[in-house]
Amino acid sequence: MIYEGQAITVKPLEDGIAELQFNLQGESVNKFNRATLEELREAVDNIRGNDQIKGLIVTSGKDVFIVGADIGEFLANFKMPEEELIAANLKINQIFSDFEDLPMPTVVAINGIALGGGFEMCLAADFRVMADSAKVGLPEVKLGIYPGFGGTVRLPRLIGADNAIEWICAGKEHKAEAALKAKAVDVVVSQEQLKDTAITLAKRAAVGELDYQARRQPKLEKLKLNNIESMMVFETAKGYVASQAGPHYPAPVEAIKTIQKAATKGREEALKIEAKGFVKMAKTPVAENLIGLFLKDQLLKKKAKHYEELALPANKAAVLGAGIMGGGIAYQSAYKKVPILMKDINQEGIDLGLNEAAKLLVKRVDRKRMEPATMAEVLNRIVPTLSYGDFNTVDVVVEAVVENIDVKKKVLAEVEGQIKPEAVLTTNTSTISINKLAEAVKRPEKFCGMHFFNPVHMMPLVEVIKGKQTSEETVATVVAYSKAIGKTPIVVNDCPGFLVNRILFPYFGAFSLLLRDGADFAQVDKVMERFGWPMGPAYLMDVVGLDTGLHAEGVMAEGFPDRMKRDFKTALDVLYEAKRYGQKTNAGFYQYKQDKKGKPKKVLDETVYDMIKPVCQASQSFSDEDIIARMMIPMCLETVRCLEDGIVESPAEADMGLVYGIGFPPFRGGALKYIDDMGVAEFVALTEKFAELGPLYKPTVKLIEMAKSGARFLTE
């Protein structure tokens, strides 16, 4: 053994070839944490001082190669003073440069995922051999930063600036075929041939058959672009990437600027430019919030894993009520290889559900993301039925009939008699109390809520709602089924609207108050979209459907009359009475016309202002700051109440529910992180400014106490 550590070993193989293997003890994956980097430093020094080594291969002892840097260490590291952080970054980069400069050829054998720092390690080698099942990429922009271990320097010099910009700015994972085509790797082989191929390559380079020094040279020099080419590549890319990323995500454009600045420099100077820019991004609130979301997501995965250990098998499912929602659920389950029965009371419903599933699959085939044969397999996993014939074979049932308590109770009682006693029964409802629905079933311990968000195939969240009598085993089974079909489950307790809709409706209530006080709905939409929402409240209400929204608002008002019941007629009421229900009727706050692709496109309809005039005060202008404050305060306060009421277990889950369920701006980190970033005391002071607007704007006693004590919701 040449070197032995907890994460890295170096041992001789044959004919002067040595193997450096990453195998981080006590972890399921390899990652670059502080300890691994220290060992890499020692291993490289040992290899450099050993003249018996004629060639080196780099392998992994796990299913993945290296998943990247240890994100758990990021937030603490990024709090270091700027100069210290730059120096620390350059110290790490020196390890990669010393590895790159070893006096023998180096070959990496990429057996599985190599992302971020893991792929940057590969770029520092002379040759890259990749298994046909592996994936590589630089996803750092998704965390508000960009590659910091030499990725912005080496990748453009290996695959060209334009390709490198696309790889770095999109942050996507690339399959072996695409990586080979882009020249990011040299050879693609089967998993079985990987190590032997790497050894053969190293031997050939060691005897001079392959010129490894020539492979290394471009990475040490400036980028091969003349001034005109350089200007065309970088200026065009900056404009396009800025339009795609939007103003709230600066990292992709900063990455291009870094590559551009470093284009005329050799490796050492280029790495200094990268380090400086990397630290600039690491210090942004965007990076802090996106890294925070990643860590919150890891917490959700850990919780789900705990539940999966208690879960009963969910090998076959059923959905009641075909339609768009039922079809979406059936598609999701079948696509993720869990067969599903789809029942409706008439053939029209079945056809609608099957058409919905087929439409989603055809889209995948058209975009070359699925083979036609696979589409047929997925459709075959959806078994349409008008009877309960095979329901005694299913493990999980999702009731997805109309949002009406009496209809749901009738259907739940009916289906419970048709399923095996150990099967789990769930209801897909957005507002109706699980405890009330449980009155209809004989086994309430086997019953809970399973709230999907629309459109099912796109929205990652599922709320798993516990009733008073729901057993842990039932919750666990539904969490496991949610995970199996590719969703992120959050377990919440029962109350009107559960977590996400309970928090969303005070936001809509704030919107109604703004319109009543003379605000322009189109201006409110623009301000909230600039704030970071995917769509403003008027547009969102049109997409949800004003009829659906008003029905849900009624349920919420009954549940929380002190702050959600209103004593005035709103613009929503007026539009509803005029049968303008939103996109579904091509008219709501906006008019909707089909674009060239057949999608509804919103157009401002001036007649709406006259229609809503009787219920609104004279038009007046509001500052962007006041609009944001008036819209966000009720939503943030309701999130606080959900946490205090025990509806959701932790601040992290509350924030993730909003990001995954209603598109809360990810770069702001969630409602509780938004309060933390403003400062709890500052937030409470802001609520006082709008106190005359009523209970929606009133902070809780506990929040006022937090403001006085300087407490926060989230601790890193």
Image (cartoon, helix red, strand yellow):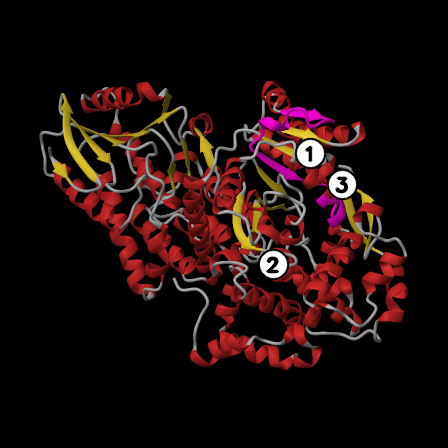
Sequence-wise, which precedes: disc 2 or disc 3? Answer: 2
Q: Nearer the viewer, mark 1 or mark 3?
A: 1
Residue 50 in view of the camera: yes
Secondary structure category for the residue under label 1 = helix
The picture quadrant where one finds residue 487 is top right
Residue 399 is situated, as x and y percent measured from the top left of the image, at 67, 40
Judge left or right: residue 38 versus residue 377: left
Classify 345 as above or below 593: above
Single out the residue that lies furthest toward the front. 442
Judge left or right: residue 340 versus residue 539: left
Classify 380 as above or below 510: above
In this rendered view, identify the residue nearer to me: 656 or 530.
656
Residue at the disc numbered 2:
532
Sequence-wise, which precedes: disc 1 or disc 2? Answer: 1
* Residue 2 shown in magenta: no
Sequence-wise, which precedes: disc 1 or disc 3? Answer: 1
Secondary structure category for the residue under label 3 = loop
Residue at the disc numbered 3:
599
What amino acid is labelled 1 in the image?
A: Gly
What amino acid is labelled 3 in the image?
A: Lys
Judge left or right: residue 392 versus residue 97: right
Instruction: Specify few, some or many for label 2: CA neighbours under 10 Å numbering under 14, 14-19, or 20 or more.
Output: some
Where is the N terminus found, in terms of image quarters?
Answer: top left
Q: Nearer the viewer, mark 1 or mark 2?
A: 1
Between marks 2 and 3, how big is the CA–CA gap? 23 Å
Query: Which of the numbered marks, if any, corresponds to residue 395?
Result: none
Between marks 1 and 2, how big is the CA–CA gap? 31 Å
Where is the C terminus found, in terms of image quarters?
Answer: bottom left
Tag 2–tag 3 contact (CB < 8 Å): no
Residue at the disc numbered 1:
327
